[in-house]
Amino acid sequence: MNLWNRGIICAIGFVTLTAAISAAEMPGVTDKEIKIGNTMPYSGPASAYGTIGKAINAYFNKVNAEGGINGRSIRFISLDDGYSPPKTKEQIRKLVEKEKVLLVFQSLGTPTNAAVHSYLNKKRVPQLFVATGASKWSDPENFPWTMGWQPNYQTEGQIYGSYILKNHPDGKIGILYQNDDYGKDYMIGLKKGLGDRSNSMIVAEESYETTSPTIDSQIIKLKASGANIFFNVTTPKFAAQAIKKIFDFNWKPVHFLNNVSASVGAVLKPAGLEKSQGIISVSYYMDPTDPHYQNTEGMKRWQKFMADYFPEGNRKESLNMYGYLVAQTMVHVLKKCGDNLTRENVMKHAANIRNLKLDTLYEGIEVNTSPSDFRPVESMQPTVFKGESFVPLGEIVKSGNDKIQ
Amino acid sequence: MDLFVQQTLAGISNGAIYASLALAIVMIYQAIDHINFAQGEMAMFSTYIAWTLIVRFDVPYWIAFGLTLVISFLGGMLIERIVFAPIHQAPALSHLLVFLGLYAIFNSLAGEIWGHTIKEFPSPFPDYSFGGLIGAHQVGTIVIVMFMLAAIYSFFKTTKLGLALRAVASNPESARLVGIKVKWMRALGWGLAASLGSLSGMMIAPIVFLDPNMMGGILIYSFTAALIGGIDSPGGAVAGGFLVGVLENLVGTYVEFIGSELKLTFALLLITGTLLLKPNGLFGRKIVTRV
């Protein structure tokens, strides 16, 4: 009897002990649920991006409805930070310390993520697949808990550089860029892609501030420099102005437009489709409005997802497709973790993705990471604007695997 | 030489943009003796109303244009009656805070109602460019700015209403004593400024595209224009607008040190310089207060 009692007490003690240990090691995870934290600009100047958070939430709802991840459902706690870094800090602390989330996923914005970059790394909380194209998120040596997702601006700039070197070796390049980290990252990438030729090929660099009313003066200077290639590193409003202006000023360069503004609905339509013909850009996932891809399996799956789980979302909005793709990557990593949902194991699997194909990435573009490569998507498809959409131009370009500083 | 001509012409077209909003700023200053920091956002909001009429309801351009002027006029009066009438005795700082509040409200409301992606706004002028130098819309804007200037000038100088408005701004007590309805004059000033602002917005939007933050940068340049020209002088504001537009382009092109990077800094330097050397602006009246 005594022995029996002691045995029960021991057993109870053991069970509580292991439960306590596993709870300590797997914060945010129970037998039924995985808690994932996120911040998004649902209000404020960048609120147009808020729809990404809604698309991700809808995708997790779909996963939960189909049985969840190894029996656990995802609880996505997405808070509004209004694109304001101090607010991001407050919300992320709340998520980590009060909600005790397993990880932070897809928080949006460069300044906002920068504000919690060292905090999350010190706390050893995964800051996964952040929604920004800055290059500093792929630094596994110094920030082993942070990882980007989309091709970063330097990678993209480098791809334009190699493309120009190959297809327009005698070109004279004029650049218009936004005077901040985003614009400068593209410049670094382009120069890297051009290699030794960059000094002789780049004939003019003009910058603008986001407060500039117009960029007419800069375009006039670029035209006067004799450039015959125009590298357009601008955000949507200025991109549309530039497209219109170079047409009005009778300047006819080969026009490279950064992916940031390569949106038919938000940039080219307002600028005028006839003025946009021949613009070259690069992309890594399909344009939801592009008639060429409407019948691919992946596109059909996305359309069905939108209809079933996010009917209020705009089906022409590529950000809704972006949210879908990045959520698929997250689910892939969580499934790989099995029942070992510790923060360490999540990072381990995030850094070991092999040839992952997603529904609407361009054919031939796959997600790949390794412990020394924290850049999930690194290849892009050059595209040219013809008629009413961007069509593929030549082969997929992969940026070198060497570390970009 | 080509570069010089092109930069000057581009400067003049930008100058017309600054001048048009500067006129609205001068107008409100004439009526309430304050600068309205929400003037740009109100203009942007009016422009969205015009856009809705033209694009969503297929109203012909000039009818929508007229309707927008009227709606903005009434809207401006309403804002004065509802928001500012209760605090008109309050110190300038309280007004400043309410201006900033209005700024945020109009900006967020526009984003909420119409979204943040840029919209194309139709121009009443043909899509034509004079030798790739200056567009028909830019020329049209300059003409309209001149027309606005003439209208404001004759309103203040030749009509009794204009005189009454000026009286209320400079000395409300005395104005009331001579039988001017001070309350309604203030509201009228707000209405006129909102109307002018909407006109300026409808001229600016085809150039910079319509979005909730369209006026942010422009407002700074327009303040510069108004301050350089003299905050109480419509003619000065227009001259100031053209001056700022042309100077910033030429300085940005020919002064290596400034380049495109310090163009905005240059505008702010102009404000500081004017306030230091000629506080009433180039064309402003000198105000002498008897102690």
Image (cartoon, helix red, strand yellow):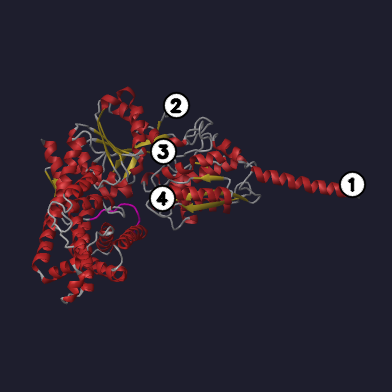
Q: Is residue A222 above or below residue B116?
A: above
Q: Residue at x 36, y 27 (%)?
A: A192
Task: Name which residue type carries label 2.
Answer: Asp
Task: Name which residue type carries label 3.
Answer: Ala
Label for residue B128?
Answer: none
Location of residue A73 in the rendering, given as x and y in whole percent from the top left corner:
60, 51
- Whether residue A391 appears in magenta in the rendering, the answer is no
Disc 2: which residue: A402
- The magenta stretch spans which residues? B114-121
Q: Is residue A378 above or below residue A196?
A: below
Marks 4 and 3 sit apart, C-alpha to C-alpha, by 16 Å
Marks 2 and 1 sit apart, C-alpha to C-alpha, by 64 Å
Marks 2 and 1: CB-CB under 8 Å? Answer: no
Residue at mark 4 shares a chain with residue at mark 3? yes
> Of the residues under marks 4 and 1, which one precedes in the sequence?
1
Location of residue A247 in the rendering, given as x and y in whole percent from the top left corner:
20, 42
Badge nearest the viewer, 4 or 3: 3
Main secondary structure of the magenta stretch: loop
Label for residue A3?
Answer: 1
SS state under label 3: loop
